[in-house]
Amino acid sequence: MCKATHRRYFETIYGFQDKGYIYSVLFYNIAPILTKDKESVLLTFSKNSKRNLYSIWEKYRNDIEKQFDLDFFQLRKTDKTYNILFYNKEKLKKTLSKKRNRRFLERFGYNGLTDVKDYLRILSNRYERACPHEIGIFLGYPLDDVVEFIDCPNKECLFTGYWKVYNNEDVARQIFDHYDSIKEKTMNFIMDGHDWHMIYDYLDKKNIV
């Protein structure tokens, strides 16, 4: 991703009113979900952020739910942070139904499940203690990389991007570049002042990629 564009984007949106700011942060992060290229994204809305995203999320959450067809699940709420998983229901369901993923998740108590919400409830319960490492499956990370991260904590990874990559470096770089391309185009759309619903529709129809 172009660092100059990234810097200019966040400098630009910081001057937006609260509603425009939360929309800008949200669309930038979930763009690969809307294009159906990624299963989910975990976002933290904190009181300690520059713009107090905790309070802004509370204020505009209902508006976001009404305006856009988004699936999200609150994994944890504290007095300082919200941890929200935004996800593509069909893509996440497909990932969770893969035989190897199901067997892996059984290690952590995800037994006999078919509904995405049931998986998310268990994930949320486990998140109350600490962010569980198996969340990588929910986020679309390759199973082999998730397993190595958990079972071989001292092993050096090949590189770090959207996740720690231990295998198939070339494939991972292509995926990361694709996510970055979607997000960069989304940033440009927002900075150009396009309507939120138009941006949402373009992402949903994959016209932006």
Image: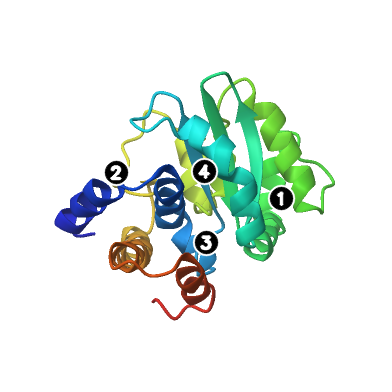
Amino acid on which the number 2 mark rests in the picture: Tyr
The residue beneath circle 2 is 14
Amino acid on which the number 1 mark rests in the picture: Arg
Q: How far apart are marks 1 and 3 (CA)?
A: 22 Å
The residue beneath circle 3 is 33
Q: Residue 5 in the image: state x and y as whole percent.
A: 19, 58
- Residue 42 tag number: 4
Give whichever of discs 1 and 2 has the lower sequence position. 2
When the figure is inspected, residue 164 is found, relative to residue 195, above or below; the finding is above
Q: Distance between the residues labelled 3 and 2?
A: 23 Å
Q: In which quarter of the image is the N terminus?
A: bottom left
- Residue 144 tag number: none
Q: Looking at the image, which residue sits at the far front?
A: 17
Q: Residue 108 in the image: state x and y as whole percent.
A: 69, 33
Q: How far apart are marks 3 and 4 (CA)?
A: 11 Å
The residue beneath circle 1 is 102
Name the one closer to the observer, 207 or 149.
Answer: 207
Question: SS class of the residue under badge 1?
Answer: helix
Tag in front: 1 or 2: 2
Q: State the image quarter where residue 192 is shown.
A: bottom left
Question: SS class of the residue under badge 3?
Answer: helix
Q: Looking at the image, which residue sits at the far left?
A: 4
